[in-house]
Image (cartoon, rainbow, N blue to C red):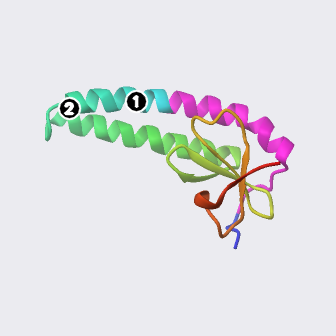
Amino acid sequence: MPTASRRSWTLPAAREMLAEVRRRTELSVQEAEKLLQQRDAALEGSPERASLETTLRQVVSHWVRSMEALGVEVKGLWLIDFDNGEGYYCWRWPEGELAYFHGYDEGFSGRVRIQ
């Protein structure tokens, strides 16, 4: 069953929006990877490590809000769906194109390539 969605997407509109989704996601991924490297270099239990973990959570939260502002549904870390009224066009980082679909009940594991 579909969840309350802000927008119903056609495939051409979703593919057009993907450029912005990828741009925003790439920036967030780069920032998160940098923070993860710094966090892993910090001592376990140190204030520096705790601060880096907080900042990392903020980066992910900002990405989620950014995706929701575009009208897409966040389904996981760097994973989004475009609701089309019959299911979802599904994309995850770092895929280069919007090439998968799954029904409302199948989820990510049930996605199939769009023909």
Q: Viewer-proximal residue, 89 or 54?
A: 89
Kindly identify the amino acid type of the residue bearing the numbered disc 1: Glu
- Residue at 83% across / 48% down in the picture? 115
Tell which circle, 2 or 1, labels the residue nearer the N-terminal end: 1
Q: Is residue 3 magenta?
A: no
| Residue 111 tag number | none
Spot occupied by residue 96 in the image (x, y as percentages of width and height)? 67, 32
Q: Reply yes or no: does residue 23 show up in magenta.
A: yes
Judge whether 55 appears above or below 89 on screen: above
Query: Disc 1 marks which residue?
Result: 33
From this view, report whether residue 2 is shown above or below residue 7.
below
**Which mark is on residue 48?**
2
Label 1 crowding class (10 Å Cα cut-off): few <14, some 14-19, many 20+?
few
Residue drawn where x is 60% and y is 32% of the image: 24
Q: Is residue 92 left or right of residue 12?
A: left
Q: Where residue 71 sits: x, y (%)?
A: 70, 49
What kind of secondary structure does the magenta stretch mostly adopt?
helix
Task: State which region is magenta.
Answer: 5-28
What amino acid type should be assigned to the residue bearing mark 2?
A: Glu
**Residue 75 as seen in the image, left or right of residue 8:** left
